[in-house]
Image (cartoon, helix red, strand yellow):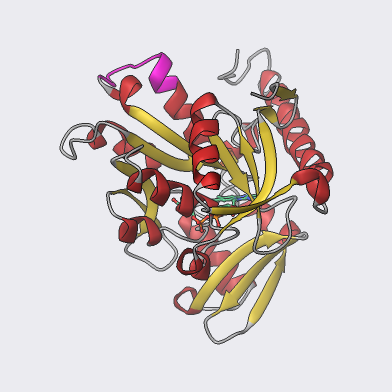
């Protein structure tokens, strides 16, 4: 096995590649290379997991709702990024109870990967969970938005109705809104900052460093994903899936913009949020706000 790389901004990983799923149906509605969906479908079909928590469809358009998916069909329903909070971990214990799962998959953003690892090491009212987490796939995440914020950004700033939106994307300094009828509206990211979830401002992880496998769009061309294979479990699943023809891959060194841009953005996030944490220490007169990392 390759030596482990330990990067101060990108975390520990065994390999990093640019990849996309070879499943055309998955790609049709995937946000990027369909890695999150294809990995969980493969893991389900191979018996590596018997169900997985994904961000399914909620009651309102583009409002995610966590679900325990136990079929390919339900996993596919969670394709696409919903830029709003989906409390994935709320189902972690229940997956091992009424759903009766023995090998639980979890997808989610960086903070949700942290929650899973913490529950595995410090299970507080989380009986059975530590031994039943079978595969975690983490997404890169710069920030997230409460649903009301997303509504304001899309309906007021981008002047689109949420019900007509086909895809949303944050890239190249803008929030992009693509409608079903082919219209594209953009909002400068500067205008969206005040809508961010405040809790994201103390987050020190950009690339889901604690996942078995993590994936995101930055670093790879459109339609492709940047993928970090991090743990022994992640490496086993990834190697088997590639050997079975599930993914097209390219060494990340051969891809533009590659790890250079990813490292730059990860550094920007971590440095900025470290500063926020520092400021919390001197928030009141002779009084600090709590530091969860202390
Ligand atoms: C809030 C947020 C911020 C992001 N910021 C960045 C970023 O700054 N840079 C970057 O490169 N990538 C970012 N991503 C990741 C990127 O948008 C894609 O989700 C990722 O590349 C996976 O694409 P895919 O084609 O493999 O996923 P698909 O195959 O389309 O599957 C989508 C997956 O995303 C999960 N998901 C969707 N919405 C949510 C949600 N709200 N919370 C938790 N899980 C969700 C689903 O469960 C599913 O597993 C962000 C994602 C989210 C949710
Ligand atoms: S920025 Fe951090 S805390 Fe906020 S949603 Fe993303 S991973 Fe979670």
Q: What residue sits 29% from the left and 21% below the top?
A: 126
Q: Most prominent secondary structure in the magenta stretch?
A: loop
Q: Nearer the viewer, residue 236 or 60?
A: 236
What percent of the width, then of the height, locates residue 105? 38, 38
155 in magenta: no
What percent of the width, then of the height, locates residue 92? 32, 34
Q: Is residue 152 visible?
A: yes
- Give the magenta-colored segment's residue range: 118-127
Q: Farthest front residue? A: 243
Q: What residue sits 60% from the left and 49% below the top?
A: 196
Q: Is residue 148 left or right of residue 66?
A: right
The image quadrant that residue 130 belongs to is top left
The image quadrant that residue 132 belongs to is top left
Q: Is residue 60 left or right of residue 217?
A: left
- Residue 108 against residue 278 in the figure, above or below: below
Q: Is residue 161 left or right of residue 54?
A: right
């Amino acid at each position: 096995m390759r030596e482990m790389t330990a990067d101060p901004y990108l975390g520990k990983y065994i390999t990093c590649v640019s990849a996309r799923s070879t499943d055309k149906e998955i790609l049709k509605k995937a946000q990027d290379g369909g890695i999150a969906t294809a990995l969980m479908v493969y893991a389900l079909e191979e018996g590596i997991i018997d169900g997985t928590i994904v961000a399914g469809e909620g009651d309102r358009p583009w409002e995610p709702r966590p679900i325990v998916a136990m079929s390919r069909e339900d996993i596919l329903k969670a394709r696409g990024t919903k830029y709003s909070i989906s409390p994935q971990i709320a189902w972690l214990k229940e997956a091992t109870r009424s759903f009766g799962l023995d090998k639980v998959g979890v997808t989610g953003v960086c903070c949700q990967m942290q929650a899973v690892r913490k529950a595995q090491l410090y299970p507080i009212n989380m009986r059975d969970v530590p031994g039943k987490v079978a595969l975690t796939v983490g997404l890169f995440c710069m920030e997230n938005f409460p649903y009301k914020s997303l509504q304001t950004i899309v309906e007021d700033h981008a002047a689109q109705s949420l019900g007509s939106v086909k895809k949303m994307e944050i890239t190249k300094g803008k929030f992009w809104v693509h409608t079903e009828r082919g219209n594209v509206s953009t909002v400068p990211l500067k205008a969206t900052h005040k809508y961010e979830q405040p809790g994201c401002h103390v987050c020190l992880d950009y690339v889901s460093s604690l996942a078995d496998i993590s994936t995101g769009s930055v670093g790879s061309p459109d339609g492709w994903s940047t993928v970090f294979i991090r743990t022994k479990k992640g490496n086993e699943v990834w190697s088997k899936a590639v050997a079975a023809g599930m993914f097209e891959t390219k060494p990340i060194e051969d891809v533009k913009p590659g790890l250079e841009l990813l490292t730059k953005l990860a550094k920007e996030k971590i440095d900025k949020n470290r500063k926020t944490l520092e400021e919390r220490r001197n928030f009141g007169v002779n009084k600090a706000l709590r530091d969860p990392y202390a």
